[in-house]
C-alpha cells in the first residue's frame, strides 16, 4: 500500500457536554461528510471521558443497515422507497471513505488531558479503562465534573496502555502537559515511552518544547514524538481544519501506531513528501532564506527579495523555521503573488527576472511556499524608493560599501564566465551526453568491483537469532540513543549527540536486573557483533578482566554474530566494513534498505577478500582507536551530564562544555572513519568518479549528510 493518509486524531461529538453544534444524529453524519469533503481518511473520536460518541456512529450505521435490508425487499414498489434506499447508500458510503477510530480524551490529575486511541475491535477496552481509573457514569462526557484518583504519572504506568496510541493534545494550552506541569514531574511525563504523539497550538511554543527535550537531559526521550496537527473539533466546520499525514504500508491500527512511533520517516504535515524532501535539501545546501514569522512580512518582503537577489541564494521559503521544520504560514498563494508583483515594482533590476513559486497547502489552513529566483547576471538590485541595497548573510541587512563592491566584482566575473561558457557550449553538450551514458556503466563497474572475490558473511560466521514478542523499541532504552540503520546520525531530538557520528560500540544496559529478569535474557560472555531489529550494527567487546557479564535484552529482536574464520577477518575489521561507504552503497543499491536484520538483506551481505580487512591491518588499528575514543567520550559525557544534574543553576555552562566535547569528538572520529573509507577505496581501486557516485547516492538515500566544513566529503548518517 505505502500510501499517504490524511488524519485528524482529535474530534469531539455531541457525546461531549461542551459540544457546540446541535446534538442530533444528523450532526454525526455531518461530521463524516465534513471529513470526506476535506479528504480526511482517518479520524479518531475523542470525546471527554466517554466513548459514547464513537459507539453512536456505529449504532446509526447498524440502524441504517437494518433499514436497508428491509426496504430492499420493496425497492420496486414506490419511488419514495427508491429515494430512501439511495439516501441510505450515500450515508453508508461515508463509512467506507473514512476510517473511524475509537478514542477518548481523559482528564487526569492534576487536570491535564491525555488521548487514548485503540483499534476498532478493542473499543470496549476504553470503557474498562475509564472504569478502572474511577470515572463513573455521571462523569462521562464532561471535561471537569470531578477528577479520578489517579494522576498522569501513575496512569502512564498502566499495562493496558501498551498496545494503545497515547497522544498528549494541546500541550502548550490549558490542560496541556507542557503548560500545566512543571519540574521533574513534567520531565518524567515527557520521557514516558507510552506517549508517542503530541499536538501544539503554537509553533513558537513547539519550538521551545523541542529545544527543552534536546538540551535538558531530564527531558530526553528514547524516540522522537510525532508532532501532529489535530483539530480538537467541537463543531462540524472544524473537522479536518488541522491534519497530518501518515505513510502506511497497510491500513491497520498496528501500522498507524508504528508510523507514530517512527514519525521522522512516516509522519508529515505535507501530503507531498517530495516537496518536503526538496525543501530540506535546499536548507541543507544552505541555498535558502527561511521565513517562519508572518509578523510585518508585508513590509519586509521587498527587503528579503532584494537581499536574496544580491546574495548567492536561489530561493526564499515561507513557512519553514531555522531547523528546516515546516511550520506553515498564513500567507496565501494570492497574497504571495501580490507581494512578488509589488517587489518587482519596488526593486530596480528585478522587473524582468523570472520567478518560480511552489505552494503546498498544509492541513491546518496554512501554507508553505518556495519562491525560486534567478539572480541578475551583473546588475546590482536596490530598492527604488530609498536607494537602499540589501544583502543576506545569516540575516537580511543593509549592504556596506565593501559588500556592494564585492557583489559588483562577482557579477562582472560571472558575466565573463558566461561569455566563455557560450564558446564552450558545444563541448559541454558532448560531455553531458557522454556522462549520461557513462554513469550507469560506472555503477555496473562498481558492482563488479565489489563482488570480485567476494564472500558471503553468512559463510564466515555463526549467529544466534534472538526473537522477541515483537517489541521494536526495547533497544531505545539502551544507553546514548538508538540506531535506524547500520550507522546513525545523532542530530535529532531523541539523542544526546550533535552532527553526524558513527556508533561502533554496542549500547549496554545500565540497569541491575533481578534474577527473574535475568532468566529471560541472553547472556553474552565473549566478544561478538550485534545487529538490532532496526538494523543498527554494533561491536560488543567483553573485557576478560571484568568478571561481570553483559546482558542483551531478549525482548528485542537481534542477531548475535561470531566470526568462525579469524585468519582473514575479525570483529574490528568486520564492523569497519559494515560501517563503510562502499558496503552501505552496495547493500542499499542491491536491497533498498540498511535493515541488515532482515533475512533477505542479511543473506546478501558480502565481505570482499581484501588485505585491509585482515587481522592486524591498518583498518583494525583505526577501528580500535575509534572504540577507545568513543569509550573516552562517553565517560566524559556522562560526567558532564552528572555535574549538570547536580548544578541545575549553571546548566548553560554544562551544555557549552558538552557541545565543545561533541565537536572535538566528532572531528576526531569523522577523520578516522574517512581514513577507513579511503583505505578500502584504494585497495578496491575505486576511481574519483566512482567515489562521487557513492557519495551522491548515499546523500540521495539519506545515508549521508554534507558537512558544512567540507561539502565534498559526505559523512555517513542514518
Image: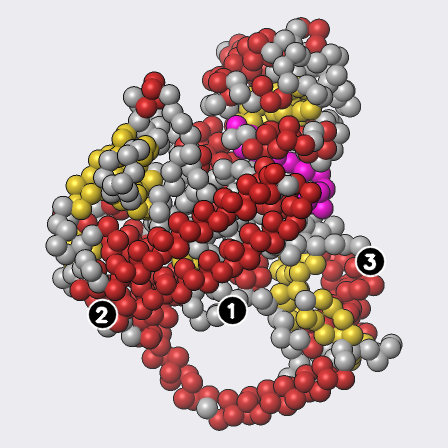
In the rendered view, would you say 563 is above or below 99? below
Q: Visible in this render: residue 158?
A: yes
Earlier residue among tags 2 and 3: 3
Q: Residue at x 73, y 62 (%)?
A: 337
Is label 2 in a helix, a strand or a loop?
helix
Read off the residue under disc 3. Answer: 296
The reply to whether dot 2 and dot 1 touch (C-beta < 8 Å) is no
Judge by depth and name the residue closer to the eye, 670 or 174. 670
Is label 3 in a helix, a strand or a loop?
loop
Q: Position of residue 433 (x, y in %)?
A: 37, 79
Judge by depth and name the residue closer to the eye, 24 or 315. 315
Earlier residue among tags 2 and 1: 2
Q: Which mark is residue 594?
A: none
In the rendered view, would you say 101 is above or below 472? above
Residue closest to the far front = 545
In the rendered view, would you say 191 is above or below 276? above
Measure the C-alpha gap from mark 3 to mark 1. Answer: 34 Å
Is label 1 in a helix, a strand or a loop?
loop
Q: Position of residue 256 (x, y in %)?
A: 48, 33
Q: Residues within 10 Å of mark 3 (few under 14, many from 20)?
A: few
Measure the C-alpha gap from mark 2 to mark 3. Answer: 59 Å
Residue closest to the far top = 137
Q: Which span is picked out in magenta?
A: 194-209
Q: Residue at x 60, y 22 (%)?
A: 153
Q: Residues within 10 Å of mark 1 (few under 14, many from 20)?
A: few
Judge by depth and name the residue closer to the eye, 349 or 453. 453
Amino acid at each position: 500500500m505505502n500510501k499517504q493518509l490524511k488524519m485528524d486524531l482529535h474530534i469531539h461529538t455531541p457525546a461531549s457536554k461542551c459540544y457546540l453544534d446541535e446534538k442530533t444524529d444528523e450532526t454525526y453524519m455531518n461530521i463524516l461528510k465534513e471529513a470526506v469533503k476535506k479528504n480526511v481518511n482517518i479520524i479518531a473520536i475523542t470525546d471527554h471521558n466517554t466513548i459514547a460518541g464513537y459507539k453512536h456512529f456505529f449504532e446509526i450505521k447498524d440502524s441504517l443497515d437494518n433499514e436497508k435490508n428491509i426496504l430492499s425487499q420493496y425497492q420496486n414498489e414506490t419511488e419514495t422507497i427508491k429515494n430512501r434506499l439511495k439516501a441510505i447508500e450515500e450515508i453508508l458510503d461515508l463509512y467506507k471513505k473514512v476510517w473511524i477510530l475509537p478514542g477518548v480524551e481523559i482528564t487526569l490529575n492534576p487536570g491535564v488531558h491525555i488521548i487514548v486511541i485503540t483499534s476498532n475491535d478493542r473499543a470496549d477496552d476504553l470503557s474498562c479503562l475509564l472504569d478502572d481509573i474511577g470515572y463513573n457514569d455521571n462523569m462521562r462526557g464532561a471535561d471537569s465534573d470531578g477528577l479520578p484518583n489517579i494522576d498522569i504519572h501513575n496512569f502512564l504506568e498502566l499495562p493496558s496502555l501498551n498496545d494503545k496510541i497515547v497522544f498528549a493534545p494541546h500541550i502548550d494550552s490549558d490542560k496541556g502537559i507542557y503548560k500545566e506541569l512543571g519540574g521533574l514531574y513534567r520531565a518524567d511525563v515527557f520521557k514516558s515511552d507510552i506517549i508517542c504523539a503530541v499536538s501544539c497550538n503554537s509553533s513558537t511554543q513547539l519550538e521551545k518544547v523541542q529545544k527543552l527535550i534536546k538540551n535538558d537531559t531530564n527531558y530526553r526521550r528514547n524516540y522522537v514524538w510525532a508532532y501532529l496537527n489535530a483539530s480538537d473539533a467541537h463543531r462540524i466546520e472544524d473537522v479536518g481544519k488541522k491534519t497530518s499525514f501518515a505513510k502506511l504500508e497497510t491500513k491497520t491500527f498496528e501500522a498507524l501506531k508504528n508510523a507514530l512511533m517512527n514519525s521522522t520517516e512516516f509522519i508529515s504535515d505535507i501530503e507531498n513528501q517530495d516537496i518536503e524532501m526538496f525543501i530540506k535539501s535546499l536548507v541543507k545546501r544552505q541555498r535558502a532564506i527561511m521565513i517562519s514569522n508572518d509578523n510585518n512580512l508585508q513590509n519586509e518582503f521587498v527587503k528579503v527579495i532584494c537581499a536574496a537577489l544580491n546574495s548567492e541564494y536561489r530561493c526564499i521559503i515561507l513557512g519553514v523555521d531555522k531547523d528546516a521544520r515546516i511550520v506553515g504560514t498564513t500567507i496565501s498563494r494570492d497574497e504571495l503573488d501580490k507581494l512578488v508583483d509589488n517587489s518587482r515594482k519596488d526593486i530596480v533590476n528585478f522587473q524582468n527576472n523570472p520567478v518560480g513559486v511552489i505552494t503546498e497547502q498544509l492541513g491546518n489552513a496554512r501554507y508553505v511556499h518556495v519562491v525560486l529566483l534567478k539572480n541578475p547576471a551583473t546588475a546590482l538590485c536596490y530598492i527604488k524608493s530609498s536607494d537602499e541595497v540589501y544583502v543576506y548573510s545569516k540575516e537580511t541587512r543593509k549592504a556596506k560599501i565593501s559588500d556592494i563592491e564585492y557583489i559588483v566584482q562577482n557579477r562582472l566575473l560571472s558575466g565573463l564566465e558566461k561569455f566563455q561558457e557560450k564558446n564552450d557550449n558545444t563541448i559541454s553538450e558532448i560531455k553531458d551526453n557522454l556522462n549520461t551514458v557513462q554513469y550507469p556503466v560506472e555503477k555496473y563497474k562498481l558492482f563488479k568491483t565489489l563482488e570480485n572475490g567476494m564472500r558471503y558473511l553468512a559463510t564466515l560466521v555463526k549467529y544466534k537469532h534472538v526473537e522477541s514478542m515483537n517489541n521494536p523499541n526495547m533497544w531505545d532504552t539502551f544507553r546514548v540513543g538508538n540506531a535506524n540503520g547500520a550507522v546513525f546520525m545523532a542530530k535529532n531530538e531523541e539523542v544526546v549527540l550533535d552532527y553526524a557520528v558513527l556508533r561502533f560500540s554496542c549500547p549496554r544496559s545500565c540497569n541491575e536486573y533481578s534474577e527473574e529478569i535475568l532468566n529471560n535474557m541472553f547472556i553474552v560472555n565473549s566478544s561478538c557483533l550485534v545487529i538490532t531489529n532496526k538494523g543498527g550494527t554494533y561491536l560488543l567487546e567483553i573485557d576478560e578482566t571484568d568478571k561481570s557479564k553483559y546482558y542483551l535484552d531478549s525482548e528485542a529482536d537481534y542477531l548475535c554474530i561470531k566470526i568462525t574464520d579469524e585468519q582473514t577477518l575479525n570483529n574490528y575489521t568486520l564492523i569497519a566494513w559494515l560501517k563503510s561507504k562502499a558496503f552501505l552503497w552496495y547493500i542499499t543499491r542491491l536491497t533498498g534498505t540498511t535493515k541488515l536484520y532482515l533475512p533477505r538483506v542479511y543473506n546478501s551481505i558480502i565481505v570482499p577478500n581484501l588485505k585491509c580487512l585482515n587481522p592486524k591491518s591498518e583498518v583494525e588499528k583505526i577501528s580500535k582507536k575509534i572504540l577507545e575514543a568513543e569509550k573516552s567520550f562517553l565517560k566524559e559525557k556522562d560526567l558532564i551530564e552528572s555535574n549538570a544534574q547536580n548544578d541545575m543553576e549553571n546548566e548553560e555552562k554544562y551544555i557549552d562544555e558538552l557541545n565543545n566535547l561533541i565537536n572535538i569528538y566528532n572531528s576526531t572520529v569523522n577523520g578516522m572513519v574517512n581514513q577507513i573509507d579511503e583505505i578500502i577505496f584504494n585497495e578496491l581501486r575505486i576511481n574519483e568518479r566512482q567515489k562521487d557516485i557513492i557519495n551522491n547516492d548515499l546523500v540521495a538515500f539519506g545515508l549521508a549528510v554534507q558537512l558544512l566544513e567540507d561539502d565534498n566529503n559526505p559523512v555517513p548518517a542514518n
